[in-house]
Every structure is written in C-alpha cells, then in structure tokens.
Image (cartoon, rainbow, N blue to C red):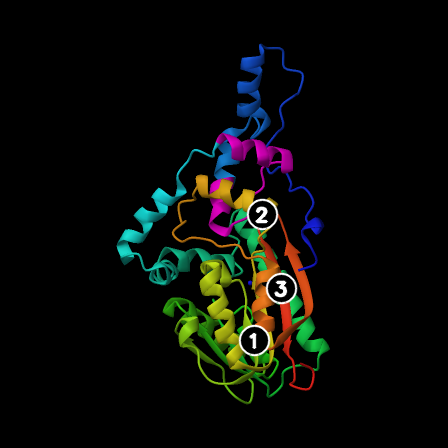
Amino acid sequence: NVAGVSQMGAPPTLGVRHASTSVRATPQSRRQQMIKTQAVGVDVTEAVGMIGEASSNIALAVGGSAAVAALSAVLIAADPEKRRAEQMKETDGDELEAVKKYFNTSGFDRWRKIYGETDDVNKVQLDIREGHAQTVEKVLKWIDEEGGVEDVSVCDAGCGTGSLAIPLALRGAAVSASDISAAMASEAERRFNEEVAKGAQAPRVAPVFEAKDLESCSGKYNTVTCLDVMIHYPQNKADDMITHLANLADDRLIISFAPKTLYYSVLKRIGELFPGPSKATRAYLHAEEDVEATLKRNGFEVVKREMTATSFYFSRLLEAKRVSNDEN
C-alpha cells in the first residue's frame, strides 16, 4: 500500500521441488517432462494450492525465476479475462462496486482474520499479515522520526481494519479514517475502542471511522495516508486517485502500491491462472516512475522510499512532501 526488488531475491520453494536435470528420455518426452516437473515440481497439488491462495494478493512463489518463466510459458493460453468478465456480471461491470461487495462479504471475513491476531490462518495469510505489518511499522517509524503526529490532522484513506489509523490515533493524531467497506470501517472502530478499553490513552480528538470510497474523501489534512489500496485501481484511475489525495494533503502524502516490474508481472500472471476460492477482484501493479510522475505533477516530491518484500506480499512505500512555490 520500498528499497528495490533485488532485496527479495529468489522466493522460497514453499513445497515446490525442482526435478533433476538428468532425465533420460527422447527430446520430445524430455521437453514434456521439463514442462510438467521442472517448472512446478513433483508436488503439483501443494504448489497449485499455494499459488491459488497467493493469487488473491498478487505475489506467489514457485521456486525461483527460472521456474516462474517456464510455468508462465505453459499457462499462457489460459483466459483470466473470461473469468473476470464473469465476476463482473453481478455488478454490471462496475469494478469499484465489485471491490466494495467483496470487502463487505467474503473478503471482510478473510482480511479481518489476516489483519487480526487469530492463529486460524494458513502460511500465506500469516506471511501477508507480517508483510503488511512491516509496511505499517515503516510508516510509523518515519512519522515518529519526523516529530510525531500529536494534534496533527491525518486522513487514512482505505483504512481497512485500522492497522495504521489506530496507532496514529493512539499517538495523538486527529484521524479521519475511511474505507469503501462499511464492514471494514466498523471493524476498525471496534478495534480502536477495544484498545482504549484495555487502557490505551485516547487522543484529544476522537478518530472518525466512515464508510466511503477514496473519491468521496474531502477536507484538508496535514498528512494523508493510503496503504495497499492502489492495487484496485488501473493506472489511469490511479493517477486520478493520487491527484485527489494530493489535493487533500497540505504537507505529506504516504502511499504504498504493488510495484510493476517484469518479475512481479510474471508472478501476477501466473496467479491469475490459479485463482483462489476468495479471489473476486482484479489486482493492478503500478510502475514507480508513473506514481512519482503523478506526485510531481501535483506539487509533491518523494523524500523517502522503502520496499517490503516477503514471500507473498510485495509493497513499495513512498513518502512525498509538498514542494513550496519558492522551491518550484
């Protein structure tokens, strides 16, 4: 919602075993065997299951870059667009409405569990939880290093279950948090109240949790944050979204997104061919240079950047500051 893709290195195998290269067979059968085993390994059922789960969150691990390339060649004939078209029928082609419906129904249960503390999560979900938590901690570290947010107005757009909005409020910020999903916004408010009931000091200005999409956010804030939301926006709409958020921010804009690189694009493509049971929305990657160019057009300069890369969670994080007219 990041320091470079090279930090990630080759993803772990996660149950995918490479086949031996010393297979004795005819050239034709050898090629077939390579396709069946070298790309995804012997343990096909486990590998596909893990890929299917990861596809709901863009990142997947299939045993290294060579395996990714081989598997993508085998599966190129599949048609994720057909599946997407079927998914969109229920909302008459309205993509944001599909996102809203997902996060108010099956998606809410899934992500409440991922962003919670329950042990009832699988390896992929736990990895995503840890990855997202790392991104949140990086944001909080930046903010603390820059003097904190006590009595500072903050808009957390796309707050989810409150993983960032709550610690900001408990640091004394005047937080306006919103999410396209009413269920998510309500859960964030419940978690905040629970923290206060446990003894956390409530801020002077109580946080506001509302159900509304990014386009409906209004007002002026010192700081605007938006983590892991751009994944639901194609580039043209992401440009408009960044412009809108920039107009809300007087001083600082902090955003994260899934970075668009050749490697991650291949991983995403493979994930689309193995949709998990809860997969209901598209996922979009964004080139960092495009995001930065949009920020610059709106008078912001990127001053900090970080990368969070776990096995199943990849997120580029940018902090941008408004450039004064004297600096332009």
Give the percent coordinates (x, y) of residue 28: 54, 14
Amino acid type indicated by mark 2: Tyr
How far apart, in angstroms, are the residues tagged by discs 1 and 3?
Answer: 18 Å
Based on the picture, tell me whether residue 53 belongs to the magenta stretch.
Answer: yes
Q: Earlier in the sequence, mark 2 or mark 3?
A: 2
Give the percent coordinates (x, y) of residue 230: 50, 62
Based on the picture, tell me whether residue 68 belongs to the magenta stretch.
Answer: yes
* Residue at the disc numbered 3: 317
* Residue at the disc numbered 2: 264
Give the percent coordinates (x, y) of residue 79: 39, 39
How far apart, in angstroms, are the residues tagged by discs 1 and 2?
Answer: 28 Å
Q: Is residue 62 above or below residue 19?
A: below
> 35 and 234: which one is in front?
234
Amino acid type indicated by mark 3: Leu
| Residue 101 lies in quadrant | bottom left
* Residue at the disc numbered 1: 298
